[in-house]
């Protein structure tokens, strides 16, 4: 989302009770509880959002904090996970056709947790939360009960390398993330998206610019990840979450090309790669801000553009940030998707909406469903969507897509029932 993956609107009124596990406990404009239930402490994620996470707390976190992980062992869901074989069939894309089938290929949700603590400046507080079997149970539910088939698994760059820029994947921490990816593959999903959730930055510095991570360092992390998943074509690589305020969109294109080249050279030749643009990769601005043109130059090793898909986000509140509990008329959001669809058809390209969502307010149910119905109608150029967000958020988070209850008896949020799953299953 525009400000942060943890930004939520200020709650109306105040609350005397402590915030629930993984609930909001602070942030600019927050008027609710600022302490947490027993066994949890209030951890600052960024200026706009603080969250209750397990443990007693250890004071302020530094931007370059050593990685620490909280597991989901205290989550309510304890039902034994189902076991399904890992499928290895490819999740490939084809050149956009002139006619639509009327149904997108992929629909699902984000499973948040390994991205917790990431600020929009690319700094990390180290407050990651391993979704563990909670994430597994949610994915199994979404596939079995909602017929969804795609999940996006965001993760901080610092987490993967234990805050050592340019270093190797940390054996311990990557194993935890890899377990969640395996849960996704075993769920029966057709697409499992590995999302590097750093806003085109590392500790405040933009990748590929003076003082920031070099393109070689960025390519290194992607080369290592690609080598791990090159035999799993259902794993897609989302190069970077929500780049913003980039100095030069063409320079960013060069950075993205370095990552794509590294991925393909590592042997991951069949995996989808999602290419993000500037301005929080907003769909409405993707053409006008030059992102589409710059990213259209990126190619595979052989010069082709197969499985290189544009990665876009769009929220339905007034500024498209995903920070309000109310949404505006869908016409303005659909106008942006219409402009992008025209460009995609003209240039034979496709895009996927990897973050979208809203509250359970009727204004958001109408707006989000209308946007997703538009994508269905234009499925020749839009591959699908993953809503924001399920995983380790509290069920009362304003954009929560976390089901209530426990494994085996989950009840979905209205936004999932009516829009995320409802629209997908309408055809």
Image (cartoon, rainbow, N blue to C red):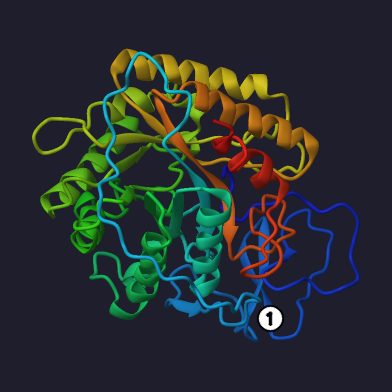
The quarter holding residue 30 reads bottom right
| Nearer to me, 410 or 394 | 410
* Residue at position x 30%, y 27% in the image: 294
Q: Residue at x 34, y 31 (%)?
A: 249
- Is any atom of residue 51 visible in this view? yes
Q: Give x and y (percent) for residue 71.
A: 52, 79
**Could you tell me which quadrant the C terminus lies in?**
top right
Q: Is residue 96 above or below residue 282?
A: above
423 lies above or below 169: above
* Rendered-image quadrant of the N terminus: top right
Of 235 and 189, the residue lying toward us: 189
Q: Which residue is mark 1?
A: 40
Characterize the local packing of mark 1: few (<14), some (14-19) or many (20 or more) Cα atoms within 10 angstroms: some
Q: Position of residue 327 (x, y in %)?
A: 73, 34
x and y, in percent, of residue 264 in the image: 15, 47
* 294 horizontally vs 314: left or right: left
Q: Kindly indicate the quadrant of the structure image that contains residue 360.
A: top right
Q: Give the side of residue 100 with respect to residue 300, left or right.
A: right
Q: Is residue 267 shown left or right of residue 49? A: left
Residue closest to the eye, 117 or 373: 373
Residue 336 position in % (x across, y down): 54, 21
Residue drawn where x is 37% and y is 20% of the image: 344
Where disc 1 sits, the SS reads strand
- In the picture as drawn, the residue positioned furthest to the left comes out as 302
Q: Residue at x 59, y 79 (%)?
A: 78
422 over 405 or under it: above or below: above
């Amino acid at each position: 989302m525009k400000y942060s993956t943890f930004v939520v609107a200020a709650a109306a009124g105040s609350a005397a009770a402590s915030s629930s596990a993984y609930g909001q406990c602070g942030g600019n404009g927050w008027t609710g509880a600022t302490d947490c239930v027993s066994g949890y402490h209030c951890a600052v994620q960024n200026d706009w959002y603080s969250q209750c996470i397990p443990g007693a707390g250890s004071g302020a976190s530094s931007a370059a904090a050593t990685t620490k992980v909280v597991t989901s062992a205290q989550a309510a869901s304890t039902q034994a996970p189902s076991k399904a074989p890992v499928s290895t069939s490819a999740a490939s894309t084809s050149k956009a056709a002139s006619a639509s089938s009327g149904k997108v290929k992929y629909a699902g949700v984000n499973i948040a947790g390994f991205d917790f603590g990431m600020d929009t400046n690319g700094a990390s507080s180290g407050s990651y939360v391993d979704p563990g079997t909670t994430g597994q149970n949610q994915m199994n539910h979404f596939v079995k009960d909602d017929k969804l088939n795609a999940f996006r698994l965001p993760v901080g760059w610092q987490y993967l390398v234990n805050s050592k820029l340019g270093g190797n994947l940390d054996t311990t921490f990557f194993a935890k993330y890899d377990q969640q990816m395996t849960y996704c593959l075993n769920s029966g999903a057709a697409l499992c998206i590995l999302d590097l959730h750093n806003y085109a930055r590392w500790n405040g510095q933009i990748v590929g610019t003076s003082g920031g991570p070099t393109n070689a360092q960025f390519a290194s992390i992607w080369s290592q990840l690609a080598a791990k998943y090159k035999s799993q074509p259902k794993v897609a690589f989302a190069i970077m979450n929500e780049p913003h305020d980039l100095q030069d969109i063409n320079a960013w294109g060069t950075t993205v090309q370095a990552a794509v080249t590294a991925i393909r050279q590592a042997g991951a030749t069949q995996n989808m790669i999602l290419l993000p643009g500037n301005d929080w990769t907003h769909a409405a601005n993707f053409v006008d801000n030059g992102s589409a043109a710059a990213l259209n130059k990126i190619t595979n090793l052989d010069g082709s553009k197969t499985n290189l898909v544009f990665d876009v986000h769009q929220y339905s509140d007034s500024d498209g940030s995903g920070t309000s509990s109310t949404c505006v008329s869908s016409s303005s959001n659909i106008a942006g998707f219409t402009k992008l669809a025209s460009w995609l058809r003209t240039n034979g390209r496709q895009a996927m909406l990897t973050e979208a969502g809203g509250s359970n307010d009727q204004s958001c149910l109408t707006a989000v469903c209308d946007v997703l119905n538009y994508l269905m109608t234009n499925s020749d150029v839009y591959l699908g969507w993953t809503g924001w967000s399920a995983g380790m958020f509290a069920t009362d988070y304003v954009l929560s897509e976390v089901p209530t209850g426990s494994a085996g008896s989950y009840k979905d949020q209205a936004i999932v029932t009516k829009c995320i799953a409802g629209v997908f299953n309408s055809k």
